[in-house]
Image: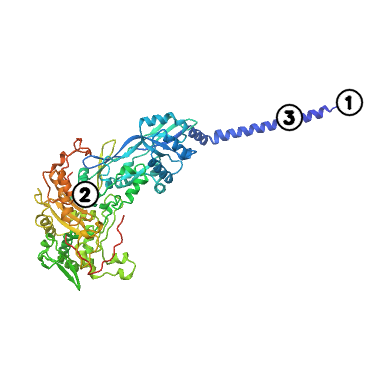
C-alpha cells in the first residue's frame, strides 16, 4: 500500500528551512557589512596609516658633523666619505661562517674581527656594525656581485671622522667613538626632541672639544620618507626634510705652536699651558705623550688599547687638565704678593738666609750648605731663597695662605671648556679633616705649614691652574676665565658667532704690590736662575724657575738624580709672561722627572715666546738640543715661523704654505697625599 506524502507539511517544512537559511545569510551579510563599516569607517584612519607604513618608511638622515679649526683656520677635525662593510647580527644565521665567507671577498684582518666582536658585545643585535671600513672600489664591486649570498650584510657609504694632524693636540681636540650602552641609557633620559635628534646617530664625542661641543658639532637630524618594496628595500623617495650640518668650532689654539711645543718635549713627559692674559684665550694646551685619535673613531682594537692603557707614560692622561704637581719655587711670586697684600711683609723686609731655616729642632735646608745672606723680596725671587719663604709661610699660617691663593685659582676649578678638570689640592685645616679618617692624621701640625711656602708639602696643582694664576698676576690682578674656543661658524651661512665669555673679575690687588712681584720676575730672566736661557731675547719677559720633588729626600741625604729611579727624580717647572710692558702671553710648563727648571722647562718657554712675539721657529739643531735638555738660549739662526710649511711633511718634501702667519696672541685624579713628617724633608730651590 503506497504511503501518501503530506504536501502541505513538506511545504511548510521547506519554507521554514528557507526562512532559516535566508536569515542566516542575511545575518552573515550583516556581519560582513558591520565588519566593513568597522574597518572602512571607524578604523579607517588607523588602518590607512598602517597600510601607508607598510608601503613607506621614515628614515633618519644623519647630519654631517661640523669641523674643528684652529685660530688660523687650519683643520683639526673633518670628515671624509668611504664605503663600510657592515653586518646586522640579528639577520645573520651563522655569524662566524658569514665572516669567514666575507674574508674571501674583502680583506678582513684579525684586528678587524676583534674590533667587531668588541662592538658586538657593546651593541644590540639589530644594530648594523662595521666589520671593515674604507673599502676600495674593487672590494665594493666584488661584494656587490656576491651580495645575494649574504643576507644581513651590506655596503654603506658613510662619512668617517678624520683627524689630519694625528697625535698633535689630541687631548684638546679629543675624538668621537660609537655610542656605547651606557651612553644610550643616558640619551634615553634626554628630552624627546634631543632624543629624536640622535636617531640614526652612531657616534658621539668622547673627549676634548669633540665631547664638550657635541651639541654644536652634531647638527640637526633630517628625515626621508621612502616607498619600500615587499622585501623592505627603498624604491623611491616620497618626501624629505634635509639634515642641518653641525657648526664649525673654531679653537683658540695655534696648531703650529702646539706642534712645536710637543716636538720640544720629545720623548719626555709633561704639560704646557699658554694663555693670553688679556682675554683668557688658550694659545697652547699641551700634554705629552699624546695618542692618535683616529684609532678610536670606529672602535679601537685590543692591541692598540692595551698599548695605550697599560703604558707607564700614561698617554691617555691629559696632564695639562688632570695632572697635578707640586708647584715648587714657581709658587714664590704668589707667596710674595700674598705677603704684600696681607701686610705680613714689605718689599724691603730683609731676612738672613744661611742656607737653612730652623723650626724648633727641625732643620729645613735651602741651598745645600751655602746660603744667600741678606735677602729682601726682590732677591728672594731672583735667587729663589727657600729660607725667605719658609719663614714667610710660618708668619702667614696655612689659613691665610689658603684664603689668598684660592681666588687666584689654586685648588679651584677654572671653568675651562673641557670636561674632566680636576681641582688639585690647596690645603688648609678643613681640607685635612675631610681627607683623612684617623684623628691623628686629621690634625694640622705647625711643621706642615713650612714647606707650603716653597710650593711643596700638600700643594698639588695643574699647569692650567698655574698658568691661569700667572695670567691674572700679569694682567694686573684682573682674572679672565680660560677658554679654548673662539667661536662657532654656521656651515651654510658662514655666519660666525663668538662664544660668550665671563666678564673679567678684579681681585683688588694694589698696583704697586703687583709691580714689585713682576719686576722681581723680570730680574729672574736678566740676572737670576733663567738669565742664560733668555740672553739676547728681543723682548722683555718675567719668569720663575721651579724644581719640585717627586719623592721626599731624608734630612741627612743629598739629592743625586743618578741614584734615583727615573720616575723619582725632580720635576722641572717654569712660569713666564711676556712682554713685561704689556703681557700678551703667560705660560706654565712642567717636564716630569727632568730636574732643574732652568735646564729643561725654561728653554721651552723661551722658544714659545720667540714664536709668538718674534715669528721665530727653532732650527733642527736647536730643537734637538731642547729635546735633550742641552739648550739655553737658541742655538744658531732661527727659522721664520710664518714661512714654515703646513701641514708638515714627514718625508721632507715641500708642503703648501701655512694658512696665515702666526703673529702672536692677537690672533685621572691625583692620588691621596701622604702626610709628611716635619723635620725629615729636604727641599731644593728652583
Whether 512 is drawn above or below 232: the answer is: below
Whether 222 is drawn above or below 632: the answer is: above
Name the residue that disc number 2 marks. Answer: 265
Q: Residues within 10 Å of mark 2 (few under 14, many from 20)?
A: many
Number of the label disc, if any, that sits on residue 2? 1
Q: Residues within 10 Å of mark 3 (few under 14, many from 20)?
A: few
Which quadrant would the C terminus be assigned to in this image?
bottom left
Q: Is residue 476 visible?
A: no
Based on the displayed image, in which of its 4 quarters is residue 562 positioned? Answer: bottom left
Q: Label 3 to label 1, Cα distance in Å?
A: 29 Å
In this rendered view, identify the residue nearer to me: 258 or 250: 258
Question: Which callout, 2 or 1, points to the residue nearer the camera?
Answer: 2
Q: Are marks 3 and 1 in contact (CB under 8 Å)?
A: no
Q: Label 1, secondary structure: give it.
A: loop
Q: Residue furthest right?
A: 1
Q: Label 2 to label 3, Cα distance in Å?
A: 105 Å
Q: Label 2 to label 1, Cα distance in Å?
A: 128 Å
Residue 599 coordinates in the image, percent (x, y): 16, 54
Question: Which callout, 3 or 1, points to the residue nearer the camera?
Answer: 1
Based on the displayed image, in which of its 4 quarters is residue 129 positioned? Answer: top left
Q: Label 3, secondary structure: give it.
A: helix
Name the residue that disc number 3 marks. Answer: 18
Q: Residues within 10 Å of mark 1 (few under 14, many from 20)?
A: few
Residue 180 coordinates in the image, percent (x, y): 39, 46
Q: Is residue 241 left or right of residue 503?
A: right
Amino acid at each position: 500500500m503506497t504511503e501518501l506524502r503530506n504536501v502541505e507539511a513538506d511545504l511548510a517544512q521547506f519554507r521554514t528551512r528557507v526562512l532559516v537559511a535566508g536569515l542566516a545569510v542575511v545575518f552573515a551579510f550583516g556581519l560582513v557589512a558591520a565588519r566593513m563599516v568597522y574597518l572602512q569607517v571607524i578604523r579607517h584612519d588607523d588602518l590607512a596609516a598602517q597600510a601607508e607604513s607598510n608601503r613607506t618608511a621614515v628614515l633618519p638622515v644623519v647630519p654631517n658633523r661640523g669641523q674643528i679649526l684652529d685660530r688660523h683656520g687650519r683643520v683639526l677635525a673633518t670628515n671624509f666619505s668611504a664605503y663600510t662593510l657592515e653586518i646586522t647580527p640579528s639577520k645573520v644565521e651563522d655569524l662566524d661562517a658569514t665572516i669567514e665567507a666575507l674574508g674571501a671577498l674583502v680583506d678582513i684582518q684579525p684586528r678587524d674581527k676583534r674590533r667587531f666582536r668588541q662592538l658586538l658585545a657593546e651593541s644590540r643585535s639589530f644594530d648594523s656594525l662595521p666589520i671593515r671600513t674604507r673599502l676600495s672600489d674593487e672590494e665594493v664591486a666584488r661584494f656587490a656581485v656576491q651580495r645575494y649570498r649574504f643576507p644581513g650584510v651590506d655596503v654603506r657609504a658613510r662619512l668617517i671622522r678624520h683627524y689630519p694632524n694625528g697625535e698633535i693636540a689630541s687631548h684638546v681636540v679629543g675624538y668621537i667613538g660609537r655610542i656605547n650602552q651606557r651612553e644610550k641609557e643616558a640619551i634615553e633620559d634626554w628630552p624627546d626632541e634631543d632624543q629624536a635628534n640622535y636617531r640614526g646617530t652612531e657616534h658621539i664625542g668622547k673627549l676634548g672639544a669633540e665631547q664638550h661641543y657635541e651639541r654644536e658639532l652634531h647638527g640637526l637630524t633630517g628625515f626621508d620618507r621612502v616607498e619600500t618594496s615587499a622585501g623592505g628595500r627603498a624604491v623611491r623617495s616620497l618626501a624629505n626634510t634635509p639634515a642641518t650640518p653641525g657648526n664649525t668650532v673654531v679653537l683658540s689654539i695655534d696648531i703650529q705652536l702646539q706642534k712645536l711645543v710637543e716636538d720640544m718635549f720629545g720623548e719626555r713627559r709633561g704639560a704646557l699651558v699658554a694663555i693670553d692674559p688679556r682675554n683668557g684665550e688658550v694659545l697652547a694646551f699641551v700634554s705629552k705623550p699624546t695618542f692618535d685619535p683616529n684609532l678610536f673613531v670606529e672602535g679601537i682594537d685590543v692591541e692598540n688599547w692595551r698599548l695605550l692603557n697599560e703604558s707607564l707614560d700614561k698617554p691617555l692622561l691629559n696632564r695639562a687638565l688632570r695632572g697635578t704637581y707640586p708647584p715648587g719655587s714657581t709658587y714664590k711670586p704668589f707667596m710674595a704678593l700674598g705677603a704684600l697684600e696681607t701686610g705680613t711683609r714689605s718689599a724691603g723686609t730683609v731676612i738672613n738666609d744661611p742656607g737653612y731655616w730652623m723650626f724648633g729642632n727641625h732643620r729645613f735646608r735651602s741651598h745645600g750648605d751655602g746660603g744667600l745672606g741678606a735677602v729682601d723680596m726682590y732677591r728672594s725671587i731672583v735667587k729663589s731663597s727657600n729660607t725667605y719663604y719658609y719663614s714667610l709661610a710660618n708668619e702667614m699660617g696655612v689659613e691665610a695662605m689658603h684664603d689668598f691663593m684660592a681666588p687666584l685659582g689654586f685648588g679651584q676649578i677654572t671653568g675651562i671648556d673641557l670636561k674632566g678638570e680636576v681641582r688639585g689640592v690647596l690645603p688648609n685645616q678643613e681640607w685635612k679633616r675631610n681627607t683623612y679618617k684617623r684623628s691623628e692624621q686629621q690634625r694640622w701640625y705647625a711643621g706642615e705649614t713650612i714647606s707650603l711656602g716653597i710650593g711643596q708639602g700638600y700643594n698639588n696643582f695643574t699647569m692650567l691652574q698655574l698658568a691661569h694664576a700667572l695670567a691674572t698676576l700679569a694682567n694686573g690682578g684682573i682674572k679672565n676665565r680660560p677658554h679654548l674656543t673662539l667661536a662657532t661658524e654656521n656651515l651654510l651661512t658662514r655666519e660666525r658667532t663668538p662664544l660668550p665669555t665671563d666678564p673679567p673679575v678684579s681681585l683688588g690687588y694694589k698696583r704697586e704690590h703687583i709691580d714689585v712681584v713682576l719686576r722681581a720676575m723680570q730680574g729672574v730672566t736678566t740676572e737670576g736662575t733663567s738669565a742664560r736661557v733668555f740672553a739676547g731675547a728681543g723682548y722683555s719677559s718675567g719668569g720663575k724657575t721651579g724644581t719640585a720633588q717627586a719623592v721626599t729626600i731624608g734630612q741627612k741625604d743629598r739629592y743625586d738624580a743618578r741614584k734615583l729611579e727615573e720616575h723619582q727624580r725632580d720635576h722641572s717647572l717654569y712660569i713666564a709672561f711676556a712682554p713685561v710692558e704689556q703681557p700678551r702671553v703667560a705660560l706654565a710648563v712642567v717636564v716630569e722627572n727632568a730636574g732643574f727648571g732652568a735646564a729643561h722647562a725654561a728653554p721651552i718657554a723661551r722658544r714659545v715666546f720667540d714664536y709668538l712675539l718674534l715669528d721665530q721657529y727653532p732650527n733642527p739643531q736647536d730643537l734637538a738640543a731642547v729635546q735633550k735638555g742641552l739648550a739655553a738660549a737658541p742655538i744658531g739662526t732661527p727659522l721664520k715661523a710664518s714661512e714654515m710649511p703646513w701641514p708638515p711633511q714627514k718625508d721632507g718634501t715641500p708642503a703648501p704654505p701655512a694658512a696665515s702667519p702666526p703673529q702672536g696672541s692677537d690672533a685621572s685624579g691625583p692620588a691621596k697625599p701622604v702626610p709628611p713628617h716635619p723635620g725629615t724633608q729636604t727641599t731644593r730651590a728652583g
